[in-house]
Structures are given as structure tokens and as C-alpha cells.
Amino acid sequence: MNKFLKILPFIFLITAATISAVGQTTYEERCDSVKAFFSTFDIAPDYFILTARFHEGVDLDTAVVTLDNLLSGQPRGDAYWMFSTMALYLHGAPNLPEQQKKHIRELWSTYQPLPGRSEHEHVLYYAALLLATENFHDMDERGWFNGKSTDLNHSEAETFLLDWFARTTEDGMEEFDSPTHTGFFLSAMLLLRDFAADQGVRTRSEIMLDWLLAEFAAKYRDGMYTGPHSLEFEYSVIRPRASAMTCIGALLFGDVELCYTGEQLLFAFSSYRPPDILRQIALENVRPHTIVQRRRAGVRYRNTTAPKYVYETTFLTPWYAIGSLDGGLIQPVNQHSWDVSWKAPIDRSTIFSLHPAASPELLAEFYPACEEEAWNTLASLYGRYPTFNKYVGGSPYEELFQYRNTLIAMYDIPKTDRHKLITTFFPHGLDATDADSTGPGWIFARSWRFLIGVFAVRPYQMVSEPAGTRFVSPFSRNGLIVQVASPPEVPTFEDFVERVKASKVDTSAFARKKRIRYTTIFGDKLEFTYGGARKVNRKKTRFDPDYLVKSPVLTSKAGTGVLRVTFRKDTLILDMKNVRITHKP
């Protein structure tokens, strides 16, 4: 991922100075602002800025010199480089000189990119390869980088993409709901939708675009991609309005100030227009509701007995969203298992906890290398991975149970683990805080209209950091109860504190049976046993494996390849299996 950021400006979190007030611009006007920004932005050689300059015809003489310098260097980035050069080749074509086109084709012959290990790398790799085989007409004579023929490369790329379209819409994604990685998939789909030779591939790409954006819109709040994330970065996890998807949301929905990220260019250049029902869901879906989704847990090279699927629950209101996975490890470095995020005039409006697991054994489950090599490589790429105070990362010793706006988190960390503790992040800028003690007990906070109580099952200490305050509890067997609300659910902070303190917390069986019982401020009786049952009002709950997504606005049954998007009297049906988009106003 680090090498990608050296190639593409995929996260230019720079606020627009030239665009008019939020909510007063059209989608086309925002696209024009994106094109103007990138075509005039002065930065070191970069493929996407050059794409904008060639597409818009801005300062072409300088652009040619800059591109020559860029192409003369040693290519790097594998799938990211492939996709970058194809975006430039196709979108910059009207003003891109033949000599530079030839140079790009030569590099596709001599540089040997690898498809990578992750889902988004494979999609970028094969999307770029498919488009290259359809546009580089002299490569059989020149020779492809992998020694294969044009026909064979095209066949392999198309086969992968068709399989990925089907697998993703019938069985779920691996790299899901990522504020930092979803843009890669969107970019690949946009380029395929606009330039693939086969109409079936183009239509499938548009279906996938609508599908991914529908999932994003359903969890979009005030510039934030809420809920848990399969992949997240240290910087944006504590700043939920500072990711690539924030900028894409600003472009698509226009409700927050425009910022810039490279993926927006492919939207701005494209004739694709997102269905208006998605904007309505993102901005007007104000009724409190729950979204439950089934996802693929990802490829493991060891510990292949781990669950095939992971389930996520997100509860949304107009003012906040709280979301969680059901627990366990799905991505060791960048997993974000749960959080609550809320609408507020502060940058860091999010609270979350994690067990900072880190070991060669856990890394080697997900990376095709020996434990020592996996540790040395990943620890050097992600310097905070081994640390106890990191902000992202998965743990096999975490289990989560969420019912509406209440969450119970439990941890059972081995005595041999590197970090036998849990941490919880509270941002600076909260309007009010109140704590019973240093635990066990409740910690309360208010931010604008958002109210939260966090019950610490074990003692803790609060540690001040530049971004906020960290709750640190150094006990192997540990747990939290999280209760959130906002008016009109509870009218005031004082009333919220009083009601939460009056609620019933039962941890008498926690030490021996790893069980917590909690009666919420709304009267629901929750019972959660680590490694055991989840109960609501004495009834066991389970996730429905027959649905990829189930909510008032999104519904998809597993195996059908169909997503039904419904809002008010409007319906959008995305049918990947029959390659059909149906809009029923």
C-alpha cells in the first residue's frame, strides 16, 4: 500500500477553496472542481495529475516533460502502476503524444508487475491487464511482460473479473466497507465501465459500482463511512472524515465540504451518474435502523479452520452510528472491529477499543511467508503494528455482541501474548466527561447531541495522547459495555447518566464463565458469553447465513447475485447474475 501512495494521489485531503457553499452545487459542478484542481495542482511527478492535465489539455508541454521523466525512472508499484498507466493512457489519449504512448507500451513489455496478494490488488491488476490487451495492439510483436500472448492475457483477465463479479455479489467481499480501500474497487469499475470492449463487462462493472456505492450510502453519515472496517489506516481511523471515501462522499452527495482524492478523477471524467436513490439514502434516511451483513473472512494460509464468514452489525440514527464485527481476526494489521461515530463539529468524533495483538504467528496466517519473514517485512512496512498503542489491528481474542445501540466487547487474551491489555480511544474535544473512578465502572461523555457511556469491567488508567485520551486496562480477561444515545432517545446528558447508572450490570460470572449480563436503558436484557451464546430478552440470537445484507434499504440473499435497494417509493434492482439494472420509481 505504501508504494501505491507514491504513485497515485489517492488521498489528497485538501479542502476546496474554489467551490461554493456546501449543498449548493450540482454533481457536475463538483466534478468540474475536481478536474480543475488536479489539472492545475503543482506537485511532483504523479500519474493521476498527469492524467488530468492530458485529459483537460492544461500546460501540455510541461506535462510531456514531466511524464518523460516519470517514465524514464524504474517502474514500481506492480498492480498499482499498471492501473495508473492505463488510466493515463485511456483518459489522456486525446492529448497524449504517440511517443509517450509507445513508451508506456514498452514498459508493459519490460517491467514485470506482480498481481499482489490482496483482493483490491487482484482487481486492479486484472482490470488494467484486460484494458491493456484491448488497447495495446503491437504487444504480440513486442512481447508482454509475462511472456503470454494477447489472447491468453485477455482471457485470463476476463475470467478473473467475471468470477470476481459473481463471487462478490453471491458470497460477499473480503475487503469490505473500507474508507481507504473501497476507492480502489470503484476506480477499477469506473475504468472498465468506460473503456472495456465487451458490453457485458461494462454493464457488470456498472452494477458493481452501484452495489458498492449503495453499501457506502447506507452507512454514510456526515462525511463518514461508519461501522466496522476490514481495512483502515492509523491516520483516518481517529479522523473518520479524513479518508478517501470522505472525499468521494463529498463529490457524490455534496453535503460536506469538498476535499480531493485521486479516485474522484475517474468519476469526474466518466459519463457514469450514480442513481439518485443512493443520494437520498445517504442524506435522507433518518429513521433509526439496523444493517446486518455477511462477509467473506479472507484467504488464510494457516489456521484454515477459522470461520469462512464474518458478520457485521451497524445501527444508524440521524446523529450517530455504532457498528461491529462479531469478533475474531480477519486482517491482522488494518482491521477495525468496532466503533461509534457521530455528527459533530469536531474532527475526531469516534470512540473504539481494541486488543493490540501482534505476533509472527498471526501474520503468517495471512501472508505466504514463514513467520520470521512475515514479521520482519510487515513490521517494517507498518511500524506501529507491534506496538501496544496502535489504533488499528485485529485480534483472535476479541468477541463482540451488538444489539441496536448497545455493544458488549469481551477479551480473553493468553498469558503468553505480547500485549495483555485492551485500549479504548476517546477523542479530544468532548463537551463533557464523567467517570465513576478508575474502574470497574462507567465512563460518560457528551459531544454535541451524542451521548455515550462505557462500562469498564476491569480497572483502567487514562493516558493522554496528542489525538485524545486512551483508556488502558492491563488485564488478560477483560470487557466493556457501550451504551449510546442522542435526543430524542434521551433528552439530556444528565438524564442519560442517571438512566445508565440505574441500569443493571451483572459481571458476577465474568471471571469464571466469561459471561456478562446487561439490561439496557431501554429495558432490553442482553446476555453474552465469550465463545458461547448471545441472548436478547432471554432468547438466543444468531446471524442469518442466507443473507448477504438485510436492512430496510438494502436486501440481498446469498447466492442470488441480486441487491434490492429500496427507499420510500423508489426501488433499484441490481442483478449481476442476469446482468441487468432495473429502476422502479
Image (cartoon, rainbow, N blue to C red):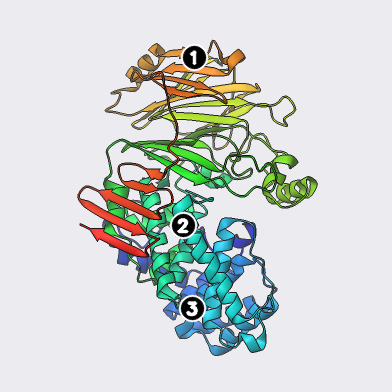
Mark 1: amino acid: Asp
Mark 3 neighbour density, 10 Å: few (under 14) some (14–19) many (20 or more): some
Q: Residue at x 63, y 21 (%)?
A: 477
Q: Nearer the viewer, mark 3 or mark 2?
A: 3
Q: Nearer the viewer, mark 1 or mark 2?
A: 1
Q: Which residue is mark 1?
A: 436
Q: Is residue 414 left or right of residue 289?
A: right
**508, 471: nearer the viewer:** 508
Position of the N terminus, as image quadrant, is bottom right
> Residue 267 placed where, x, y %?
40, 66
Q: Which residue is mark 3?
A: 90
Q: CA distance from mark 1 to mark 2?
A: 41 Å
Where 311 sits versus 405, above or below?
A: below
The local secondary structure at tag 1 comes to loop
- Indicate which disc residue 449 carries: none
The local secondary structure at tag 2 comes to loop
Q: Quadrant of residue 227?
A: top left
The reply to whether residue 389 is in sight is yes
> Residue 462 placed where, x, y %?
58, 24
Q: Which residue is mark 2?
A: 14
Mark 1 neighbour density, 10 Å: few (under 14) some (14–19) many (20 or more): few
Mark toward the start of the polypeptide (3 vs 1): 3
> Residue 246 placed where, x, y %?
43, 52
Where 168 sits versus 132, above or below?
A: above
